[in-house]
Amino acid sequence: MSADLFIGLMSGTSLDGVDAVLARADSQGRLRVLAHEHQGFATQLRTELLALNQASDNELHRVALAANAMARCYAQACRALLMSQRLSPNEIRALGAHGQTVRHRPGEFDGTGYTVQLLNAALLAELSGIAVVHDFRSRDVAAGGQGAPLVPAFHRAVLGDDAQDLAVLNVGGISNISLLWADGRSSGFDCGPGNCLMDGWIQRHLGQAYDHGGQWAAQGTVQQNLLSALLREPFFHAAPPRSTGRDLFDLQWLDAHLMIHAPNVAPVDVQATLLELTARAIVQSLLQFAQGQWTRLLVCGGGAFNTQLMQRLQALLPRLAVDTTDAQGLPPMQVEGAAFAWLAMRHVRHLAGNLPAATGATGLRILGSYTPA
């Protein structure tokens, strides 16, 4: 068994599928990505995962079956990755598997709250033949944290620059930002909706999974009254540490605002407004809660391919160079998978994986649970 090959498996709030990344970690914990595979979700699974973000009938039964389906999807992505590199399972030290978030309510209800990522890790270990590190967020929540975002520590390790203050933005279903100061300090927090509202809206009206390049949004006109109403959501004004998810930002949330503030607005104008909401939430977060001499914003996740969104970010942040993580040698769709390979490496080497300055946890913690092959 190699001591330095890890697989990271990530399926985010965009619900587009699983990204599998193979990476090699050296003795100092530095990570180099070797390969990447994407496994899309079957329509039925995606529909069920989306439904499970809200209270519904027979949840325990449906959650258990969805967790099994996630394990099979993850295992298929692993097999494709290993085949592409002509590797066998016993050459992989461990795989880090995020699971699919369906509820994220840290700090609520009883003072601790919870976060739920669906995955049958035991089944994944059986199907893949590889040790599985999973359930990364719960330990941080138990330590008083938000359990999110977890990527800032990884961004520091892989993308940090001791010559300049650097911000790294991930735009998946939800957007989150990592703040990497040149003096070694790091932090981060969730900004708000990334692609989740835009994806849901275009699927409802055009039957498309996402707005390719933001082309549909570019044809519409931003509705300022609606935008102002959406931006009054208390989350946008809450100081970090903070995190969010589809528990808040879903089409029901949007529909409630549309009914009051824009009952007759054309769907294309709503899409334009949602793109502007995503951009404004990111920029407002950076300007209000991130003190630093920022000169670069590196973008990863699916939102990095939304040309219209990238243009709006650059227009709203004229003093920053807005680019994708490709500029640092890490393609945008590999970043989060690589992060969970890194977190798996940190777990098996008994090293902390969280960043309390980002999550609000009371201290550093080794994240995840371990299921042997």
Image (cartoon, grey):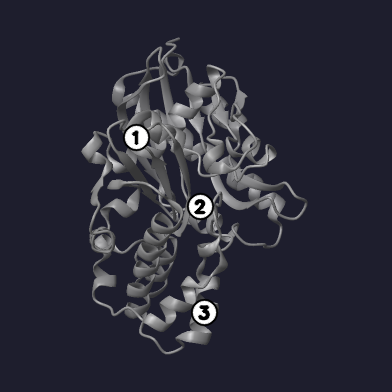
Q: How many marks?
A: 3
Q: In 3D space, how far apart are the residues under numbered discs 2 and 3 (Cα atoms)? A: 29 Å
When asked about the image quadrant of residue 156, the answer is top left
Asked if disc 2 and disc 1 are in contact, CB closer than 8 Å, the reply is no
Labelled disc at residue 299:
none
Residue that sits furthest to the right in the current view: 110
Q: Nearer the viewer, residue 190 or 60?
A: 190
Q: Which of pointers 2 and 1 lies earlier in the amino acid sequence?
A: 2
Q: Residue at x 27, y 65 (%)?
A: 214
User: From the image, which quarter does the C terminus lie in?
Assistant: top right
Q: Which of pointers 3 and 1 lies earlier in the amino acid sequence?
A: 1
Q: Which of pointers 2 and 3 lies earlier in the amino acid sequence?
A: 2
Residue that sits furthest to the bottom in the current view: 264
Count neighbours of disc 2 (C-alpha within 10 A) and say few if under 14, some if 14 to 19, many if 20 or more. some
- In the rendered image, residue 286, in percent from the top left (x then y), is placed at 40, 55
Q: In 3D space, how far apart are the residues under numbered discs 3 and 1 (Cα atoms)? A: 41 Å
- As drawn, is 249 to the left or to the right of 317? right
Q: Secondary structure at mark 3?
A: helix
Q: Nearer the viewer, residue 174 or 36?
A: 174
Q: Nearer the viewer, residue 140 or 35?
A: 140
Q: Is 231 drawn above or below residue 306 in the view shown? A: below
Labelled disc at residue 182:
1
Instruction: Look at mark 3 in the image and give the residue it sits on.
Output: 257
Labelled disc at residue 45:
2
Q: Residue at x 48, y 74 (%)?
A: 230
Count neighbours of disc 1 (C-alpha within 10 A) and say few if under 14, some if 14 to 19, many if 20 or more. some
